[in-house]
Amino acid sequence: MDTFVRFMEEKFVPVASKIGAQRHLVAIRDSFMVTMPLMILGGLATMINNLPIPGFQEFMNSIFANESWKGFGDSVWEGTFAVLSVMIAYLVAHNLSKGYGKDPVATGVVSVASFFALGGATGMSSTGLFVAIIVAIISTELFVRLIGNEKLVIKMPDGVPPAVAKSFAALLPAMIVISIFGLITAIFAAFGFDDIINSFYEAVQQPFMGMANTYWSALLLAFITPFLWFFGLHGANMIDPFMQTINAPAIEANINAISNGDVAPYIVNKPFIDSFVNLGGTGATLGLIIAIYLVGRRNKAYKVVNNLSVAPGLFNINEPMLFGLPIVLNPIMFIPFIIVPMVLVSVAYFATSIGLVPVSTVMPPWVTPPVIGGFLATQSFSGAVLAAVNLILSVVMYIPFVKMGVDQALKKIAEEE
């Protein structure tokens, strides 16, 4: 085990650290963090419109004629999910340009304009998400290079306000970048692709979401995040760009399917992972906290860290446990920290696939306590029960390793005495 850890520290960790700090991935991750409250709000508003409580719809319709009460939820959806791709097109470009030290506002505006030049008006919701990210990255890379070319700067006479001079400095680069995307649209149209956004969605994004929805992809997601965390790398942040690109379209597709009376097509999404796998944080460490209270109190170090970790752990914040126990680079905790999430995702996936638990359609805030999160994500008490069952499973699986850690600690103390 020690040899493996040394090998990973020397060979794997430096590469993974570079990937995690890669400017494009960081820009995508930070952009989705900004839109997270909007996705939560949009999901909750849609949940109200489709609340699966017997008699609720009839009761509301009896008060408000012609389902007018649904106007609130519909309006909130229009301001959140319906324009998500536009916001991402701006935010990714904005964040990426800051890394280059260029004007983030101008870059974001050019990105949005380029997105619409490519036909973004037909894909402003999550269906255009992949294209919005691609456009944001390409337009930013072009714009930041062109804006630094002195030959493309329109020089203004002295005395012109700085804001005006700045806008004219970006004029030609902006025109060139937007024109390039307009030309791409014209070329595609000449070959019969009048709607690039939806064509891309049907050809690439939808199949990719389907691949990411399999049991094996869920198992991989459950493995890779704690694996990275074991070596001190923020696994959740590193895979978040990937998760978010499939998350919003999957939730929207589930909501639309249920609204139309169809079966929700996507089991794997962020609320599924948050509510049934990351109980207390990556590695389901709330189960570890409970296990230490049950069998680990003889180890004073465990007990102190546990008392400090329990409050944050209830809200899925587990850095005190990761670095205080520690779990990071702790060979005893390596196995359960990796295996527990994989078992939990398996239980949750098959429970959902056979219909014991509804598919997750609402994205609770990530700090929502376990069990409550399961109820909110699925709008069902069966979701809460599944989260509770998974929490119990995590406790049971952590107990033998807590005992092992306690025995080793006590043995070491005895030897020192």
Image: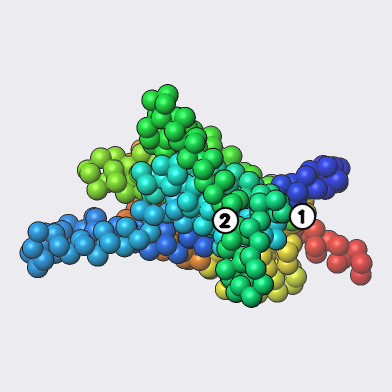
Few, some or many residues within 10 Å of mark 1 (<14, 14–19, 20+): some
Residue bearing mark 1: 330
Disc number at residue 384?
A: none
Tell me: 73 left or right of 237.
left
The amino acid pointed to by label 2 is Leu
The amino acid pointed to by label 1 is Asn
Residue shown at 54% from the left, 37% from the top: 217
Residue shown at 50% from the left, 35% from the top: 184
In primary-sequence order, the first of circles 2 and 1 is 2
Tell me: 53 left or right of 255.
left
- Where is residue 351? Give x, y as percent: 40, 43
Residue bearing mark 2: 171
Q: Secondary structure at mark 1?
A: loop
Which of the image's four quarters has the N terminus? top right
Please state which of residues 294 and 390 is positioned toward the viewer in this rendering: 390
- Examine the rendered structure and indicate whether residue 316 appears above or below residue 194: below
Please state which of residues 260 and 180 is positioned toward the viewer in this rendering: 180
Few, some or many residues within 10 Å of mark 2 (<14, 14–19, 20+): some
